[in-house]
């Protein structure tokens, strides 16, 4: 006889064994009152920490006023206010915004826009990228075969080009960059003609694929090719943006301006909202009815996003991410000298990955054991990479030097415990 008691899908797997009864700043607190340093930030979402008082107050005020003002039915006053604030942060001429709920919806919206704006069918993405789990975004995702397995065929019109992951190739950064630009040019004569290529879509710092930054020469090479052929350049800043990299946008590290930016995660400190930024001229080239959704730009989430922007500015959290990222970088590189299994330390700001290896082989098993030992000692972290071999560091932007030092101390204890 079937058990009719409702339960969660068995496919939902937790990375930790923790039940979160409360969140407070950089900490998660379980039902027994034990505090855990949260260096997952809800996968880079709780940028201002858990339950920042100003974000909580803004959401509470909005809940008491208007919860759901459907954006294509009536105007929610928070949306133009949020667009105005975002417009002060995005590079010129990206001054128009389409709001939705999640990063994957932004990816879907970006594909619709670039195809309609250019009249071209194909999108070039880059090996190791993660852009979401809905079918269009999943078709552009190559960070792990587990995400795509069992749901083929994928959406057509997606071309995958190599990403300059020098450590993976075993080359210098210049060698990897030269190779990837050559292969991109080869794609234009073997797979997708420039006049049929609508956009290149890339993470300036890859997330799920292993916390791999691009580099200035590579992104400038993309910009040059896009300008030459009338192709749009779209940056997926869903995880790396909003201060996480130590600059407000990760692409600022590389001196390249895109034609569109995908925004989500850290935008509203945990409330579901995302945005696609482009110029008003580009947005106007989309077709009527191509942008919309029942919950996109929800009033409460928009109010939380406005408060989040204010907190990031008032408390200097981008600057803090830069300072604390350097502290984290120094601590991890000091450890790397004594622990050769830490084969590579990479990233930007407070988005840092440590690649664990056994000899020449990615060591996802060791990374998993390290995370469990960290959890036992009061530190929560996540893994990523195709073999789950990357220990990723994603503390909130409010993190302090003492918390960075405590976390890296726990990490060293975990390294010893799993040796």
Image: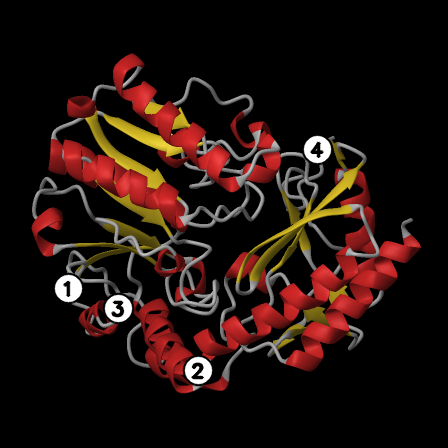
Residue 283 in view in this figure: yes
Identify the secondary structure beneath mark 1: loop
**Is residue 33 rendered to the left or right of residue 70?**
right
Q: What element carries label 4?
A: loop
Residue for badge 4: 2
**Which residue is labeled 3 in the image?**
86
SS for dot 2: loop
How far apart in space, not on screen, are marks 1 and 3 (Cα)? 21 Å
> Which label lies toward us, 3 or 2?
2
Q: Is 72 above or below relative to 22? A: above
Numbered tag placed on residue 316 in the rendering: 2
Residue 102 is situated, as x and y percent measured from the top left of the image, at: 39, 52
Find residue 417 and report its image quarter.
bottom right
Mark nearer the N terminus (2 vs 1): 1
- In this rendering, the answer to whether 238 lies above or below 231 is below
The residue shown at (77%, 38%) is 363
Who comes first in sequence, dot 1 or dot 3?
1
Q: Residue 74 carries which label?
A: 1
Q: Left of 130 or right of it: where is 388? A: right
Crowding at label 1, few (<14), some or many (≥20) Cα neighbours within 10 Å?
A: few
Q: Where is residue 157 in the image (x, y as percent from the top left)?
A: 29, 22
């Amino acid at each position: 006889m079937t058990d009719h008691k409702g339960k969660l899908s068995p496919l939902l797997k937790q990375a930790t064994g923790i039940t979160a009864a409360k969140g407070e700043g950089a900490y998660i607190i379980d039902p027994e009152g034990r505090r855990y340093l949260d260096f997952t930030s809800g996968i880079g979402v709780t940028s201002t920490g858990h339950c920042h008082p100003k974000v909580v107050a803004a959401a509470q005020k909005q809940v008491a006023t208007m919860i759901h003002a459907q954006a294509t039915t009536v105007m929610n006053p928070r949306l133009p206010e949020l667009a105005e604030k975002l417009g002060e942060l995005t590079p010129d001429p990206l001054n128009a915004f389409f709001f939705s709920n999640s990063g994957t919806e932004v990816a879907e919206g970006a594909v619709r826009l670039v195809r309609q704006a250019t009249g071209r069918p194909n999108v070039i993405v880059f090996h190791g990228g993660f852009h979401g789990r809905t079918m269009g975004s999943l078709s552009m995702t190559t960070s792990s075969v587990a995400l795509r397995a069992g749901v083929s065929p994928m959406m057509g019109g997606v071309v995958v080009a190599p990403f300059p992951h020098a450590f993976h190739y075993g080359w210098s950064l210049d060698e990897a960059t030269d190779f990837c630009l050559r292969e991109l040019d080869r794609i234009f004569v073997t797979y997708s003609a420039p006049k049929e290529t609508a956009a290149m879509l890339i993470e300036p710092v890859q997330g799920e694929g292993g916390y791999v930054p691009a580099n200035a020469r590579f992104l400038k090479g993309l910009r040059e090719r896009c300008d030459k052929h009338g192709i749009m350049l779209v940056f997926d800043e869903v995880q790396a943006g909003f201060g996480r990299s130590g600059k407000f946008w990760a692409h600022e590290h590389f001196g390249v301006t895109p034609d569109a930016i995908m925004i989500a995660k850290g935008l509203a400190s945990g409330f579901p909202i995302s945005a696609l930024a482009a110029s008003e001229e580009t947005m106007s080239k989309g077709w009527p009815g191509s942008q919309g959704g029942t919950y996109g730009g929800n009033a409460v989430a928009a109010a939380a996003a406005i408060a989040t922007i204010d907190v990031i500015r008032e408390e200097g959290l981008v600057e803090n991410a830069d300072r604390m990222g350097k502290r984290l970088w120094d601590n991890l590189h000091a450890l790397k000298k004594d622990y050769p299994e830490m084969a590579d330390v990479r990233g930007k700001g407070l988005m840092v990955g440590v690649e664990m290896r056994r000899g020449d082989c990615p060591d996802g098993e060791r990374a998993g054991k390290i995370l469990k030992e960290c959890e036992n000692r009061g530190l929560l972290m996540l893994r990523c990479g195709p073999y789950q071999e990357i220990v990723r560091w994603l503390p909130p932007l409010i993190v302090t030097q003492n918390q960075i030092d405590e976390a890296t101390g726990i990490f060293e204890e975990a390294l010893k415990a799993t040796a």
